[in-house]
Image (cartoon, grey):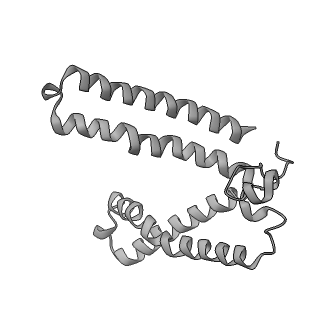
């Protein structure tokens, strides 16, 4: 329920603090004022800030290519506008997801698409493409097909569950 505190998790801290461990762990009352927890939160924040440009560069470049930024007059200005809009958009998403009850389901929704495709579906499709369907045995074809079907079923159920949680 939205009015409840963060859900209790079984974590490394579970052995020390029992069932009072909250998610995220730094919300546990006994850990909130600990200096090491503040340092860890600062390091995680610094990592996110410094890793953001590395992670966002490929999608930004793809968007710039789709918009043909290099062929426009003043491409540097266009590039700055596109990248600023991407930063602004991701900032909006982060503000919208500040409430813990939204973040988990949103992450589940994104993961049900991205992780399922990158871990299960695309490797099978690439294997079929690179080796050729005719050069694979029936067992290999059935195995790849089975993986793809189960991945799609899992992604579908994961997406439906995440959407239900987001809408409730």
Q: Which quadrant is home to the C terminus?
A: top right
Q: Residue furthest top?
A: 138
| 2 up-or-down from 36: above or below | above
Describe residue 71's horizontal placement relative to residue 24 as left or right. left
Residue 115: image location, x then y, percent: 46, 45
> Observer-nearest residue: 158 or 79?
158
Q: Residue furthest left?
A: 135
Residue 40: image location, x then y, percent: 65, 74
The structure residue drawn at horizontal position 68% and vertical position 62%, both measured from the top left corner, is 95
Q: Which quadrant is home to the N terminus?
A: top right
| 129 up-or-down from 23: above or below | above
The structure residue drawn at horizontal position 51% and vertical position 76%, both measured from the top left corner, is 50
> Observer-nearest residue: 77 or 102?
102
Q: Residue furthest front?
A: 15
The structure residue drawn at horizontal position 84% and vertical position 64%, both measured from the top left corner, is 29
Q: Residue furthest right?
A: 3
Describe residue 62's horizontal placement relative to residue 103 as left or right. left
Tally of marks: 0
Image quadrant where residue 39 sits:
bottom right
Image quadrant where residue 34 sits:
bottom right
Residue 23: image location, x then y, percent: 73, 55
The structure residue drawn at horizontal position 35% and vertical position 74%, both measured from the top left corner, is 75
| 72 up-or-down from 93: above or below | below
Residue 97: image location, x then y, percent: 68, 56
> Observer-nearest residue: 5 or 3?
5
Describe residue 155's horizontal placement relative to residue 44 as left or right. left
């Amino acid at each position: 329920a939205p009015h409840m505190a963060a859900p209790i998790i079984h974590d490394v801290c579970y052995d020390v603090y029992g069932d009072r461990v909250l998610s995220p762990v730094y919300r546990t009352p006994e850990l909130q004022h600990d200096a090491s927890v503040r340092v860890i939160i600062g390091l995680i924040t610094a990592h996110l800030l410094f890793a953001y440009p590395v992670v966002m560069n490929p999608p930004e470049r793809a968007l710039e290519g789709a918009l043909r930024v290099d062929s426009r007059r003043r491409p540097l200005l266009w590039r700055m506008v596109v990248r600023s809009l991407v930063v602004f958009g991701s900032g909006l998403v982060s503000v919208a997801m500040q409430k813990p009850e939204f973040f988990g389901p949103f992450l589940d929704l994104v993961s049900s698409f991205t992780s399922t495709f990158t871990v299960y579906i695309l490797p099978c499709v690439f294997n079929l493409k690179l080796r050729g369907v005719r050069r694979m045995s029936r067992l290999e074809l059935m195995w790849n097909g089975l993986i793809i079907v189960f991945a799609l079923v899992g992604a579908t159920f994961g997406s439906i569950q995440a959407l239900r949680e987001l809408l409730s």
